[in-house]
Amino acid sequence: MVNDHSNVQRKNGVTIAEQEKLPRVALNDPFKPSNSDELVVCLHCGRLYPIKDVLWVNMCGLWCCPFSDCSGAGVGFDIHKASPDITR
């Protein structure tokens, strides 16, 4: 698991905490992330981060991994709840 992502640039997008900036399609998406500190892991880059950091990216119309060097997209597809084994 890659946990140090302080040097990685963030993608342009909107988090769930910024609901007033989200398009209606993002707010109605059944895979919309919660605004919590629950940890998730991206299957593409292996990073562990809070689900509230997942970004809505208008260009692709999906909730995506927030890191610019990763193409992970879709809560429940590429982005999954972290198991307790990972977070220890």
Image: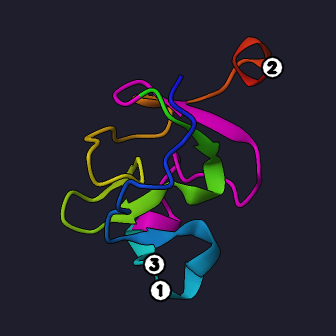
Give the quadrant of residue 87.
top right
Measured Cα–Cα span from mark 1 to mark 2: 35 Å
Q: Are marks 1 and 3 in contact (CB under 8 Å)?
A: yes
Provide the major secondary structure of the magenta segment.
Answer: loop
Which residue is the site of mark 2?
A: 88
Name the one closer to the observer, 8 or 30. Answer: 8
Foreground: disc 2 or disc 3? 2
Foreground: disc 1 or disc 2? 2
Which residue is the site of mark 1?
A: 21
Measured Cα–Cα span from mark 1 to mark 3: 4 Å
Q: Which residues are magenta?
A: 26-45
Check disc 2: other Cα within 10 Å, few if <14, some if 14-19, many if 20+: few
Under tag 2, what secondary structure? Answer: loop
Residue kind at label 3, given as amino acid type: Leu
On residue 80, which mark appears?
none
Residue kind at label 1, given as amino acid type: Lys
Q: Is residue 85 left or right of residue 61?
A: right
Tell me: residue 69, above or below residue 55: above
* Quadrant of image for the N terminus: top right
Measured Cα–Cα span from mark 2 to mark 3: 33 Å
Under tag 1, what secondary structure? Answer: helix
Which residue is the site of mark 3?
A: 22
Residue kind at label 2, given as amino acid type: Arg
**Residue 29 magenta:** yes
Q: Is residue 60 left or right of residue 47?
A: left
Q: Residue furthest top?
A: 85
